Image: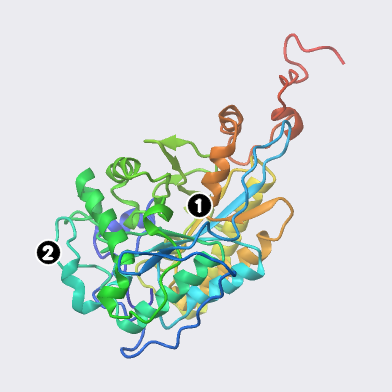
Amino acid sequence: MAATQRIAASVVAAAACASSLAGCASGTGTPGHGAAGAPRPEHRPARPPGTVVRLIGDGSTAYTGAQPHQPRPARLKSGEKPPQFVVFSWDGAGEDGQRLFSHFREVAKENNASMTFFLSGVYLLPEDKRDLYRPPQHAPGSSDIGFNDTRGIADTVRQLRLAWLEGHEIGTHFNGHFCGPDGGVGQWSVDEWKSEIEQAKQFVQTWRTTSGLKDLPPLPFDYGRELIGARTPCLEGRENFMKAAAELGFRYDSSGVNDQVWPEKRHGLWDLSMQLVPFPGHTFEQLAMDYNFMVNQSGTQTQGDPARYEHWGNQMRDGLLRGFYRAYDGNRAPLIIGNHFESWNGGTYMRAVEDVMKEVCTKPEVRCVSFHQLVDWLDAQDPQILARLRTLEVGEAPREGWASFLSARPAPAPKGVPGAPAR
């Protein structure tokens, strides 16, 4: 969020990010979502006739039935080539004066894409109610990304409502975004993670009461049921988070770093880590996240040399596209991309993400999906088929072709292997 997130100043955090092994962004104290005052008039989304609305709690959320626009997952048929999944995800999602949340909803609509928005719970908590937040290992009311104002809460709630009705997923990026060795999420226990998760849910479930915006319609989903996954701040504290999340019924985590290979489960959750992709002009690979591209280009300066903006954006765009085509023409592993609603280096990374969405999401056999949709598909598959897909290395297509590789019948031995029939 503009003016809400600063780069961690510690040498440890900078070094971690520079090595592309952490998606880092932490914050100062003021969110700056919008000018204080009355929110804009609410445009209520149309609901189909006969929709049953069951208010939950104080009416901040409501059960309105199954989420619209969700594909029905189907098991791969014998010999069928898997689709190429691409997940665009947004850390700390909220709407501020840049209007990037609303902008990318429109980009997704134009390109038949669903996305995941990892909401920071404190973006629905007003500054004057900050003491309701009790962060682990920090004083009540502490937050490294601040809190919100009435206008910002109203704008963010509107985007969350519309996004869910359009088929996007609302996950969580938790609350105060604490990174580093001094009480950061990497030091939290399983019980402390449970507290943080429950508070993230609570702020979503009580925004009408805390903000006083009781004339606005509820979010059209039961967050307690819809919330099935997350990404931890700075990718820290993952092990204890995953243990807590598994106990609370989560289904996936996207807080790790991995190669472009097919996912597997850890602690009972799908490990949907972000991935390393080519970094044009360099011999090393780069995490598929805007923040990490920035750190490896302009260091801790969020607004570097303007003469380099176009080049830096092109580097990110081309790196993501190389990663995409490496999978699309190779092992078809899902491509996981992480972003922030930020205008770092003149907004060049937002341009890069938009260019990638426009190029890949309308291609044959490509599905730009949310994490929720991806795990639904993974859970529908034959575990033996998924295990076979995991034998493929980065960019490796089956030598004998997909029809043979995923056939229910044993694949023939490659030519030249002892015992193979002569030709």
Ranked by sequence position, the earlier of labels 2 and 1 is 2
The mark total stands at 2
**Residue furthest out toward the right:** 423
Q: Secondary structure at mark 2?
A: loop
Q: Nearer the viewer, residue 268 or 154?
A: 154
Q: Nearer the viewer, residue 253 or 212?
A: 212
| Category of crowding for the residue at label 1, using alpha-carbon neighbours closer than 10 angstroms: few (below 14), some (14–19), many (at least 20) | many
Amino acid type at image mark 2: Ala
Q: Nearer the viewer, residue 203 or 81?
A: 203
Q: Residue 164: x and y, percent?
A: 50, 65
Distance between mark 2 and mark 1 Cα atoms? 33 Å
Q: Is residue 37 above or below residue 207?
A: below
Q: Nearer the viewer, residue 181 or 416?
A: 181
**Residue furthest out toward the left:** 139
Q: Residue 158: x and y, percent?
A: 45, 76
Please give left or right for residue 32 compared with residue 349 in the image. left
| Category of crowding for the residue at label 2, using alpha-carbon neighbours closer than 10 angstroms: few (below 14), some (14–19), many (at least 20) | few
Amino acid type at image mark 1: Phe
Residue drawn at x 45%, y 77% as measured from the top left: 305
Query: What residue did someone put label 1 on?
Result: 371
Q: Is residue 263 above or below residue 116?
A: above
Please give left or right for residue 34 compared with residue 308 in the image. left
Q: Quadrant of the C terminus?
A: top right
Query: What residue did someone put label 2 on?
Result: 139
Q: Residue 49: x and y, percent?
A: 59, 70
Please give left or right for residue 60 compared with residue 110 in the image. left
